[in-house]
Image (cartoon, rainbow, N blue to C red):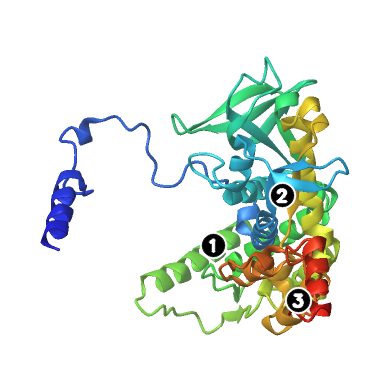
């Protein structure tokens, strides 16, 4: 015991490291590059979207799309999923897209930028071979880029350079850049679309609210004389300035007027129907996007969520996957039955009370094994070999299912007839 404790202490002293104690004396003289108080690669919404409630709608859609798993897979000869390929592209999509983003954060960035701008580019940054020379390359990192200029066969992309922490403009061929266009462009990004009209109405409502809360008194003063000449107008202006000075200089905001002057205060602004128009445009936008208020507040039932996934999330994730399959997989790779597919977990919306019945049906009909069901629940896989087999445990299994050959089965039957067993 003493030796083991002594050896542990010795190893800790020899190989241990502390972030505060084991520091290089020249650490502060190292040039770490340009620094920021805020994360420089984070997407910034444009066109007034960051000042309206549509940001919450964009964020909800982006989170739900990023929750769907995208993988680089191998198919069988019938075009069915066979296995996941161990490639750099799959690592970018599932684990590490770049030095700043995980695979899920990268997809969320893509969707947020696409909804905001209408079209976004996915650019391979680090590759095994120059994509301009050969199409047979593996992707080690990728970034989301903003398309600022379009050319016949190229695009100018504003891309974040992680080496110097700056956004730079690059002209890249369209063949190596995945260009994702918003499938809901007509509803969200068109100049006179429902979303743009809603944003304009919300900006008008914000302007009215700021004006009403600016501290103005909105008074009308009736003077005891007719104001038609220039001299009378100057006299009226001097009277208004006098009242303004009294209210400003008084610690309690008190001013005096002549007994012949009448003051009328506008207690509320002129009525408008902005709120009714905003409510109408909001309900129309939700119906066109396949969303409801219950989806945003988390009270939607399974049918509502299924309709939302089919009408909103599925078109967006399909656009992303199809474009990456078209640009990042060569014709040879597609001939070798490589593909990019997305998978949505159907058990996320299942209540706990219904999970037992679903698990029984899945295992009884030999659709899922016991260990696959245990993985959905969050339990460790069982070491029983039967737990990885597609068998119905409610029925008596054949000898083949129990790893017994037909010859062993015949010998057992003969022993039973002879009375030996």
Location of the C terminus (image quadrant): bottom right
Q: Which residue is mark 1?
A: 237
Q: Which of the two discs, 3 and 1, labels the residue nearer the N terminus?
A: 1
Secondary structure under tag 1 reads: helix
User: Hey, which quadrant is residue 339 in on the image?
Assistant: top right
Q: Rounded to the nearest whole Å, what is the CA distance between mark 3 and mark 1?
A: 94 Å
Secondary structure under tag 3 reads: loop
Which residue is at 60% across, 46% downward? 106
**Residue 361 rendering spot, x and y as whole percentages:** 80, 76
**Residue 366 rendering spot, x and y as whole percentages:** 81, 68
Q: Which of the two discs, 2 and 3, labels the residue nearer the N terminus?
A: 2
Which residue is at 67% across, 14% downward? 133
Which residue is at 45% across, 29% downward? 163
* Horizontal relation, residue 55 to residue 290: left or right: left
Q: Which of the two discs, 2 and 1, labels the residue nearer the N terminus?
A: 2
Q: Nearer the viewer, residue 177 or 89?
A: 89
């Amino acid at each position: 015991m003493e030796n083991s404790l002594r050896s542990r202490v010795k190893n800790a002293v020899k190989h241990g490291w502390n972030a505060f104690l084991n520091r290089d004396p020249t650490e502060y003289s190292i040039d770490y590059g340009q620094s920021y108080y805020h994360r420089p690669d984070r997407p910034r919404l444009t066109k007034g979207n960051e000042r309206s409630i549509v940001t919450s709608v964009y964020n909800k859609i982006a989170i739900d799309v990023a929750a769907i798993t995208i993988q680089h897979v191998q198919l069988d000869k019938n075009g069915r999923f066979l296995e996941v390929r161990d490639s750099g592209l799959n690592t970018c999509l599932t684990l590490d897209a770049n030095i700043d983003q995980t695979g899920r954060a990268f997809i969320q960035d893509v969707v947020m930028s696409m909804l905001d701008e209408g079209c976004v580019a996915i650019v391979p940054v680090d590759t095994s071979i120059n994509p301009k020379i050969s199409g047979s390359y593996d992707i080690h990192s990728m970034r989301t880029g903003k398309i600022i200029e379009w050319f016949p066969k190229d695009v100018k992309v504003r891309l974040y350079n992680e080496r110097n922490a700056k956004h730079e403009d690059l002209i890249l061929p369209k063949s190596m850049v995945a260009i994702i266009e918003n499938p809901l462009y007509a509803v969200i990004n068109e100049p006179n679309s429902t979303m743009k009209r809603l944003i304009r109405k919300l900006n008008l409502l914000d302007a009215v609210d700021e004006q009403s809360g600016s501290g103005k008194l909105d008074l009308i003063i009736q003077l005891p004389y007719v104001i038609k000449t220039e001299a009378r107008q100057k006299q009226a202006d001097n009277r208004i300035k006098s009242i303004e000075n009294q209210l400003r200089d008084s610690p309690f905001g008190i001013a005096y007027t002549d007994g012949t002057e009448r003051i009328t205060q506008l207690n509320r602004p002129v009525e408008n129907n902005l709120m009714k128009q905003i409510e109408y445009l909001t309900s129309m936008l939700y119906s066109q996007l396949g969303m409801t208020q219950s989806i945003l507040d988390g009270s939607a039932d399974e049918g509502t969520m299924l309709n939302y996934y089919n009408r909103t999330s599925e078109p967006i994730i399909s656009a992303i996957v199809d474009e990456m399959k078209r640009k990042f997989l060569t014709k040879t790779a597609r001939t070798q039955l490589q593909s990019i597919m997305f998978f949505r977990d159907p058990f996320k919306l299942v209540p706990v009370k219904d999970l037992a019945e679903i698990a029984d049906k899945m295992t009884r009909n030999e659709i899922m094994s016991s260990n696959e069901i245990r993985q959905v629940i969050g339990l460790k896989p069982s070491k029983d070999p039967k737990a990885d087999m597609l068998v119905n445990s409610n029925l008596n299994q054949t000898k083949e299912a129990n790893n017994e050959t037909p010859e062993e089965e015949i010998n057992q039957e003969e022993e039973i007839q002879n009375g030996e067993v």
